[in-house]
Amino acid sequence: MKKLISFAIVLAALLTLVSCGGKVYEAEAKEFTSNGMTITLTKSFVENTQQGYTVCYDSNAVAVIALKEAFTMMEGFEDWTLEAYADAIYQNNAANNPTTPAKVGDRMVMEYTFFNPDTDITYHYYTCMYKGSDGFWMIQFACDVNEIEEYKPYMIEWADSVRV
């Protein structure tokens, strides 16, 4: 019985090390597709669910949270420009003091920080907005604010890979 318990403890420790070891950007690239959005991340990410969002991908250091807002949600929404959509997202996040949305390639980008009292961590959000053929997408890349300098170049790379 003691050997079985010892084996279980060692196995749990190994699984913890494997799941937490290494940087998320060091893993092999992996393409994820869900609900009309494709993104290339790494094998360190797993698809997850988050209430109120269309799809989420988690790793040990970075979360990717995506929301699709279909054009059918309100009349005339398909006529909005990406800039108008980004302004609405900006206004809705005003309490977090976001940066002014800026055009970067085919997307609008803004950044802000948010303190989560449940985890006692301040997160940095790199938020990208895209216009697809049937809706707008808001894709947020989030990590501990103390790790943003390390992860932001990869967030930008991952944002560049998005197709909607």
Image (cartoon, grey):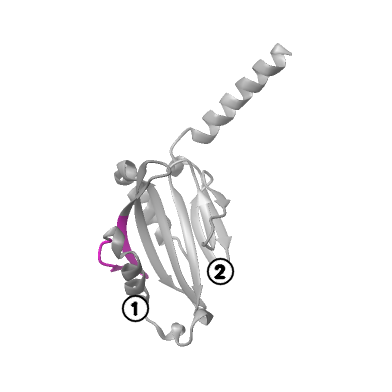
Q: Which quadrant is the N terminus positioned in?
A: top right
The answer to whether residue 83 is visible is: yes
Q: Residue furthest right?
A: 1
Tell me the quarter of the picture where residue 99 sits. Answer: bottom left
- Is residue 53 positioned above or below 118 on the image? below
Residue drawn 46% across the image and 69% down it: 137
Residue matched to label 1: 84
Residue matched to label 2: 36
Q: Are marks 1 and 2 in contact (CB under 8 Å)?
A: no
Image coordinates for residue 92, horizontal then vertical, percent: 35, 68
Image coordinates for residue 19, horizontal then vertical, percent: 54, 35
The tag on residue 6 is: none
Amino acid type at circle 2 is Gly
Classify mark 2: residues with Cα within 10 Å, few (<14), some (14-19) or many (20+).
few
Tell me the quarter of the picture where residue 159 sits. Answer: bottom left
Q: Is residue 110 magenta?
A: yes
Q: CA distance from mark 1 to mark 2?
A: 22 Å
Q: Nearer the viewer, mark 1 or mark 2?
A: 1
The answer to whether residue 104 is visible is: no
Left or right of residue 158, residue 43 in this image: right
Q: Which residues are magenta?
A: 98-112
| SS at circle 1 | helix
Left or right of residue 128, residue 13 in this image: right
Q: Residue furthest top?
A: 2
Left or right of residue 33, residue 75 in this image: left
Amino acid type at circle 1 is Ala
| SS at circle 2 | loop
Q: Main secondary structure of the magenta part?
A: strand
- Is residue 82 positioned above or below 144 on the image? below
Left or right of residue 3, residue 76 in this image: left
Q: Is residue 136 magenta?
A: no
